[in-house]
Amino acid sequence: MAIVAQSSKFSTYGRPVLAWGVGLLFFFPIFWMVLTSFKTDADAVKPEHLIFFTPTFDNYLNMTDNYDYWRFATNSVISAVSATAFTLFVSVPAAYAMAFNPSRSTKDVLMWMLSTKMLPAAAVLYPMIFLAKSIGLYDTHILIITVLSLINLPIAIWMLFTYFKEIPKDIIEAGKMDGVNTWGEIKEILVPLAWGGIASTALLVFIFCWNEAYWTVRLTTIDAATLSKLIEGNRAPEGLFFGRLSAVSTAAVGPIVVLGWFCQKQLVQGLTFGAVK
Amino acid sequence: MGRIVLDQVSKKFGDVEVIPPLDLTIEDGEFAVFVGPSGCGKSTLLRMIAGLEDLTSGNIEIDSEVVTEVPPSKRGLAMVFQSYALYPHMTVRKNIGFPLRMEKMAPDEIDKRVEAAAQSLNLIDYLDRKPGQLSGGQRQRVAIGRAIVRDPSAFLFDEPLSNLDAALRVGMRLEISEMHERMQTTMIYVTHDQVEAMTMANKIVVLQAGVIEQVGSPLDLYHKPQNVFVAGFIGSPKMNIFSGSEAEKHGAHTIGIRPEHTDVSMTDGTWEGRVGVAEHLGSDTFIHVHDTGLTDMITVRITGDISVKHGDKIYLTPQADQIHKFDAKGQRIA
Ligand SMILES: Nc1ncnc2c1ncn2[C@@H]1O[C@H](COP(=O)(O)OP(=O)(O)OP(=O)(O)O)[C@@H](O)[C@H]1O
Ligand SMILES: [Mg+2]
């Protein structure tokens, strides 16, 4: 009895408090960034205006003058959308093959793919830059889309693999008996059944692509530069314009935060790798 | 048409040989049942015929055409799975029509055929439901409907009734038999239930550890089991089988006598024993007899009711012409 009472006490009071605590901790930097974006550059660095200040929209209104926001935003959209599409185009058939026609080495291939995520990115930074420059792809959409796809493929394949695993093999086999070829199995049976999982995967990959900074910053200068590059590039030598920078940062993460907000359910599902039904 | 020939077909999973090379012919229009204990390779054999499992060696022919390398979708066979394997995202109508849609049949023709199949399976009222909204028996019918709509050259069933309750099972058993009588299409049916095998089959294939122990009609198997395994497997209650001096008297290493081929008396007979449990079914009585000195327990089956109780002394007399004799290797002695 005591244990039951205790655990229910925790779930009525303790758990919400803990959840809110963690939530606020994570949310605080974003809150601070949004707050700062409404201060003038001068106010932003003054302690007396930490909380109390006269809000201004100038940072947003001047954003397109101060920075070429729309070009960077367009690049972000192009590279994130294309990379997500390409990642799915490769990972859906790959995960399908691994889930339903595993070979002896399927487990090893999966582990190996995951291990590439453990490779420090810096280790291949210079080879990548030289390679990109020598084949003339430096600062192009093609390069960014390829790189974003490659770094997200392992996670996408893993996620989809876990989702596909939950589909009874019999159903796929029934499809075969009913005269469906491999492409038909994917189109008619797999995709409709795993739609939720595929959507979560797509969403997560899209967010990762949008937020990616390490490679997009280093492999672009102007033409293919994304919002990550815009933010990074504004560590101006004449000092930091915190107000402006916060505004542009808010505008950069804004779309993804809104997207994430609307797709919370899918995201949670995706992040728990299909463990939550 | 659906004559299926297995020629030296074998299967290994890794290093484990699940099915040593075997030959088997199933004639067009036959109702063949694969029966055997759990894990003997029935499903594996069926799946090899379906094309869902590769052969380790040998060949499979359907209507004189070698299909060993032909994918399942091109073999023209229909399969009903134990789990039903319906498409959960499609309505009953879509499920049944799916194989036709894959054949690119015209939509009105599909509708017509689906309605006809649904009519014959009593599914008309459920056509717009999803499988999740159906009972087990209804799902089973949908699975059968999906198999029959496209006139396959043979039907493959893998324990299709094992998820149903006993009453429904008997009903569906009859329906499938009816269906076979009507369509005269080849059917291969896997079960571990020997009653299903006996009641439905034209030809029973008894398997043990991937080896065919005997192929024959139900009555062949009942009257002339080729070995001790088949003798013990076919028939309910099980045949009484024992070795020893009593068997030697009949010039055999082992003898078997079915429960229904033993006469009972309270006063005299060949073997003497004591009643353990008597099971009264009304139409029959099964008496389990101990202390005969032959084997632990002998089961006899009497038509009608007989009043015996635990501990009664009882005499048994086997019908001489119904004694099955086997040699030391367990093979039937003619
Ligand atoms: N994919 C597989 N990998 C390894 N071994 C397998 C595989 N499938 C089946 N087996 C083995 O092959 C043997 C035969 O299996 P199968 O499923 O054909 O038996 P079954 O006669 O259908 O049994 P049941 O009546 O329980 O369905 C079993 O010993 C099983 O463990
Ligand atoms: Mg089986």
Image (cartoon, rainbow, N blue to C red):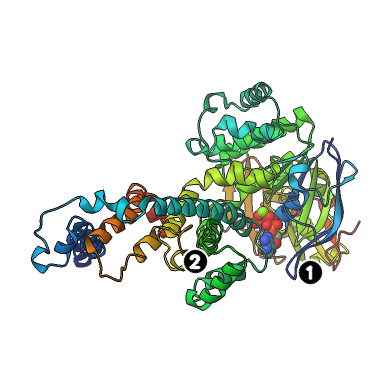
Q: Name the residue under label 1.
A: B244
Residue type, mark 1 in image = Gly
Q: Within 8 Å of ligand 1, the CB of disc 1?
A: no
Mark 2 and mark 1: Cα distance apart in space: 88 Å
Q: What crowding class fits label 2: few (fewer than 14 Cα within 10 Å), some (14-19), or many (20 or more)? A: many
In this view of the protein, which residue sits in the foreground, B48 or B286? B48
- Between circles 2 and 1, the one closer to the viewer is 2
Classify mark 1: helix, strand or loop.
Answer: loop
Ligand 1 image position (quadrant) = bottom right
x, y (%) of residue A25? 23, 65
Q: Mark 2 points at which residue?
A: A219
**Subunit bearing disc 1:** B
**Subunit bearing disc 2:** A
Residue at image position (14%, 53%) is: A55
In this view of the protein, which residue sits in the foreground, B249 or B259? B259
Relative to A80, residue B181 above or below: above
Number of marks present in the image shown? 2
For the question of whether residue B306 can be seen, the reply is: no
Quarter of the view holding residue B99 = top right
Do the numbered discs 2 and 1 sit on residues whose CB atoms are within 8 Å? no
x, y (%) of residue A82? 52, 51
Left or right of A47 on screen, residue B301: right
Residue type, mark 2 in image = Leu
Q: Residue B115 carries which label?
A: none
Relative to B296, residue B151 above or below: above
In this view of the protein, which residue sits in the foreground, B176 or A239? A239
Residue at image position (19%, 62%) is: A41
x, y (%) of residue B328? 85, 68
Q: What crowding class fits label 1: few (fewer than 14 Cα within 10 Å), some (14-19), or many (20 or more)? A: few
For the question of whether residue B9 can be seen, the reply is: yes
**Are tags 2 and 1 found on a single chain?**
no
